[in-house]
């Protein structure tokens, strides 16, 4: 598809069904996406005027419904993709370079044959691109050069997992163009998590990446984190009278990575004291039986966080069952 063809399809309304499926069907929403995609097409053309053969990609943010801070302990979660996403217009090159530009930041470049962790670039866009490429390389997939212009509707630090959406966006582009879509959503999510943990330098569970990769409303059981159980929850929330409202509070958790990591580390400390790696491996009754001994080696906050895990993990599973039964009162 050429830039001209994309613009023509937007202006003619040919893409309105796609926009409706992704963002909602009301007229103002559709028109806002016309403006957004036309702006992205114009900016791509200005940056890469000689690159007219393009593809368009999208990856969504996510909201957490149930299972707060359970995923990094291999627990159960309920979460949903949202209609705030990152879109990308992409052309491919033979330069061996990924050029990435966005409405939010100037162009950065990453060579496709330089895949080692770079400590000086942790926390940057470059680190995530490099990490995703490295994840695919570990599966024998070589990334081609590409020119990317992106526009994100996901506020950074808003709790909607903009980093996971970005990882899934880059992963989807590589998977589609360089791998014949041979990587499934679980592997794609694991590659994104690897990029975030190792290259970007931030701890995370697997929920964010899985939900962005899967789309829709999902129940996820991470007891076997290498082969998680994923289930689309088919429930019509609008017919039941429910709507998820996302509010921009004007704040950010972008500078709270250390606090997030502390939650995971403190839960794991409790698990380690009981001879396990994560809390999911521990029987809840055993935890409470050994609580007097644990008080001698764990802080009160660590123990309260462990209690939170057991309660929240059970709650997520019960919520999923209630939704399967169509029981919103439960």
Image (spheres, rainbow, N blue to C red):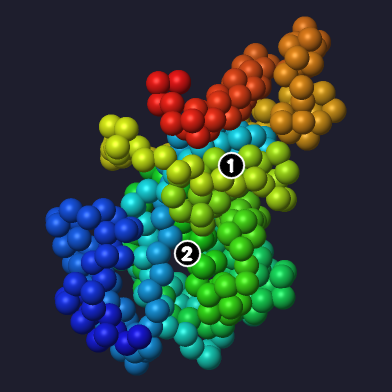
Q: CA distance from mark 2 to mark 1?
A: 21 Å
Residue at 46% from the left image edge and 53% from the top image edge: 215
Mark 2 and mark 1 residues within 8 Å of each other at the beta carbon: no
Give the side of residue 83 with respect to residue 216, left or right. Answer: left
Q: Looking at the picture, how far across and down is residue 127, in whole percent?
A: 56, 63
Q: Residue 259: percent from the left, percent from the top? A: 54, 33
> Quick one: 129 or 34, which is closer to the camera?
34
**In the picture provided, is 207 more to the left or to the right than 277?**
left
Q: Is 252 left, or right, of 305 in this rendering?
A: left
Please say whether residue 242 is visible from this viewpoint: no
Q: Residue at x 77, y 31 (%)?
A: 281
Q: In which quarter of the view is residue 189 placed? A: bottom right
| Few, some or many residues within 10 Å of mark 1 (<14, 14–19, 20+) | many
Quarter holding the C terminus is top left
In-front residue for pair 96/53: 53
Residue 194's x, y, as percent? Answer: 64, 56
| Label 2, residues with CA under 10 Å away: few <14, some 14-19, many ≥20 | many
Q: Is residue 182 visible?
A: yes
Q: What residue lies at 49% left-to-right and 42% top-to-bottom? A: 233
User: Would you place residue 115 above or below residue 278 in this image?
Assistant: below
Quarter holding the N terminus is bottom left
Disc 2 or disc 1, which is closer to the eye?
Answer: 1
Quadrant location of residue 106?
Answer: bottom left
Q: Which mark is residue 220?
A: 1
For the residue labelled by badge 2, is the local secondary structure a helix, a strand or a loop?
helix
* Secondary element at tag 1: strand
Quarter location, residue 4:
bottom left
Name the residue at the front extreme: 325
- Residue extending furthest toward the right: 275
- Residue assigned mark 2: 169
């Amino acid at each position: 598809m050429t830039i001209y063809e994309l613009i023509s399809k937007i202006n003619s309304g040919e893409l309105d069904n796609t926009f409706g499926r992704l963002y909602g069907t009301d007229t103002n929403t559709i028109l806002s996406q016309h403006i957004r995609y036309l702006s992205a097409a114009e900016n791509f053309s200005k940056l890469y005027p000689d690159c007219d053969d393009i593809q368009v990609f999208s990856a969504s943010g996510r909201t957490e419904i149930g299972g707060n801070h359970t995923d990094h302990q291999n627990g159960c979660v309920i979460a949903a993709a949202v209609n705030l996403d990152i879109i990308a217009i992409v052309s491919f090159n033979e330069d061996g370079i990924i050029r990435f530009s966005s409405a939010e930041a100037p162009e950065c470049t990453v060579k496709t044959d330089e895949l080692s962790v770079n400590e000086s670039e942790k926390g940057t866009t470059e680190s995530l691109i490099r990490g995703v490429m490295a994840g695919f390389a570990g599966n024998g997939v070589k990334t081609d050069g590409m020119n990317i212009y992106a526009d994100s509707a996901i506020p950074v630090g808003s709790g909607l997992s903009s980093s996971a959406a970005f990882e899934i966006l880059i992963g989807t582009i590589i998977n589609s163009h360089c791998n014949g879509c041979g990587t499934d959503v679980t592997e794609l999510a694991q590659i994104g998590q690897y990029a975030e943990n190792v290259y970007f330098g931030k701890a995370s569970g697997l929920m964010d990446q899985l939900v962005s990769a899967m789309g829709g409303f999902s129940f996820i059981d991470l007891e076997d984190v290498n082969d998680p159980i994923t289930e689309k929850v088919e429930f019509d929330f609008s017919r039941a009278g429910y709507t998820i409202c996302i509010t921009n509070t004007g704040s950010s958790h972008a500078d709270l990575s250390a606090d997030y990591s502390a939650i995971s580390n403190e839960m794991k400390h409790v698990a380690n004291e009981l001879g396990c790696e994560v809390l999911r491996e521990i029987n809840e009754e055993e935890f409470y039986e050994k609580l007097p001994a644990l008080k001698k080696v764990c802080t009160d906050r660590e123990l309260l966080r462990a209690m939170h895990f057991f309660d929240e993990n059970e709650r997520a599973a019960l919520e999923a069952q209630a939704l399967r039964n169509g029981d919103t009162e439960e």
